[in-house]
Amino acid sequence: MAQTKKVGDHCSKPTLPLCRSSKCVKYGIVLDAGSSHTNLYVYEWPAEKENDTGVVHQVEVCKVEGLGISGYSQDTEKAGLSLQHCMKRAQEVVPEQQHRETPVYLGATAGMRLLSLQNRSMADRVLSAVEKTLRSSPFNFQGARVISGQEEGAYGWITINYLLGNFKQPGWLNFLPHLRSSRGTSGALDLGGASTQITFAPDQELIESQENSLHFRLYGKNYNVYTHSFLCYGKDQALRLKLATDLQSTQNGSLLDPCFHLGYLRIMNISDLYTNPCIANGEQQLPFTQLHLQGNGDYQRCRMTIQKIFNTSYCPYSSCAFNGIFLPPLQGEFGAFSAFYFVMNFLNLTTEKSPVPLDKATSAVESFCSRPWHEVKAEFPKIKEKYLSEYCFSGTYILSLLENGYGFTMEKWQNIQFLGKIGSSDAGWTLGYMLNLTNMIPAEKPPTRPLSHASYVGLMVFCSLVLVAVLLLSWLTFHKPKCLQKGLI
Ligand SMILES: Nc1ncnc2c1ncn2[C@@H]1O[C@H](COP(=O)(O)OP(=O)(O)OP(=O)(O)O)[C@@H](O)[C@H]1O
């Protein structure tokens, strides 16, 4: 990202055709092809206000069922139909006369990154099948590609700071340049199924590893941003990593798992567990073909088993997260979204007001894990069994990742806000991606009109009236009626 820097490009000009009517609205569509499914987002903004932060907002989200890493190889027909359904939905939302000018982008994330590593031709086939459908839509299809982890982190950071209005400097700050850097940005924490990203503007100038460093110039201000995407540390892949580690110590494929509720049973094929590059080839050494998992709901033990997937034994930098990856000291507020939000929201740990303290969050997860499966299932009959059965693991994983992986202490934890939406828009990388590709985030601050159009017209009318009054008065003063002048003499 830092190398190919498109964000804040100096010659940025909106690439979308300008609307003729001053009232018209423009649209953009982004598809997020994730590890479990694809989401289609429709964004809209007032035409005359592009370059204004915060005006672009989401008007529609449609879930494309089956179009995710598992669906790619399984039910392609279902995935195709679901994609067509979402494209139809987009056609209803965007007025027909604007279909041809509305850009559509597809970005595939970590699920596809893994599929490409494992089976490149399959990944290419999936992308071209999706491209074919998108090309046949009436919209202006701009391409489908796998985005890098660095881009995913960067665009997530741009999205939340754009929506929170953090890029917008109040006009009066232009006259006090020394204060301009005082307005902070918010860090971004994104948890997907296959990868997780941490992105923030650190206090220290020097980012010790080049691959974690991004430089942006946005709205006339420079940003040095740290980002890292941990592939295989999304919540689904992290569970696989944990199970693969636990399996090393079983003899017969039976596993008593503290991260699942007491009474919960799951049977998995060992080959399914090993079908991706996150897990090194340990399968051959196992003398069994199935894993019989039995829950025993014990938060403390669960946390210990999860801890094993973070290698903290080496660090070639002044400070690290885990697996030898550089992480500067945490700085400022953080917005945590995607699965961070889904899981914490289910556990009632997201509040609008003040954040739930770390010890309270820990007790809540601990008490949820200790509940027997039949009780949990009876209380939440409408929640997908896959999600419900894994909230204990996911909650514990989130606490482990944030506390031990990234070093959010009791105090720093208070700076995390779990975000589903900001205004009407979902927090995630897609909005930042579209803002960048449509050049809607300029490097320099657009010249601001000191007055709105209406105030400008009002002021002109007022000035004209004053001018007429002054002229009239002068005329009256210097051209007094002659009879009056005579009478006075
Ligand atoms: N309501 C929910 N409760 C629990 N988990 C959920 C819920 N909705 C989605 N998820 C899971 O959250 C994870 C994140 O989903 P999301 O679509 O944001 O990421 P992703 O696109 O899979 O990310 P990536 O491909 O970058 O890893 C996935 O594992 C998904 O299955």
Image (spheres, rainbow, N blue to C red):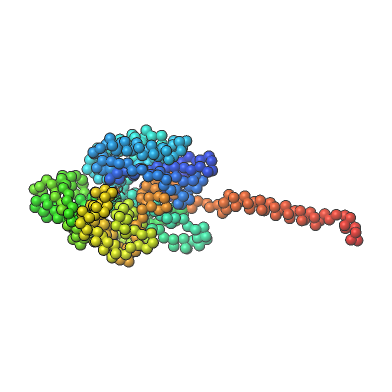
Horizontal relation, residue 414 to residue 285: left or right: right
Task: Name the residue at 37% across, 51% down.
Answer: 427
**Spot occupied by residue 396 in the image (x, y as percentages of width and height):** 24, 58
Horizontal relation, residue 392 to residue 478: left or right: left
**Spot occupied by residue 84 in the image (x, y as percentages of width and height):** 34, 36
**Spot occupied by residue 214 in the image (x, y as percentages of width and height):** 36, 53
334 to 114, vertically: above or below: below
Name the quarter where the C terminus is drawn: bottom right
Of residues 270 and 376, the one drawn nearer to the viewer in this rendering: 376
332 to 386, vertically: above or below: below
**Spot occupied by residue 338 in the image (x, y as percentages of width and height):** 32, 52
Could one spot residue 427 in this view of the protein? yes
Q: Residue furthest top?
A: 136
Of residues 131 and 88, the one drawn nearer to the viewer in this rendering: 88
- Number of marks: 0
Could one spot residue 3 in this view of the protein? no
448 to 141, vertically: above or below: below
Task: Name the residue at 73% across, 55% down.
Answer: 470
Horizontal relation, residue 11 to residue 407: left or right: right
Residue 225: quarter of image? bottom left
Of residues 373 and 38, the one drawn nearer to the viewer in this rendering: 373
Task: Name the residue at 33% across, 34% down.
Answer: 132
Task: Name the residue at 90% across, 59% down.
Answer: 487
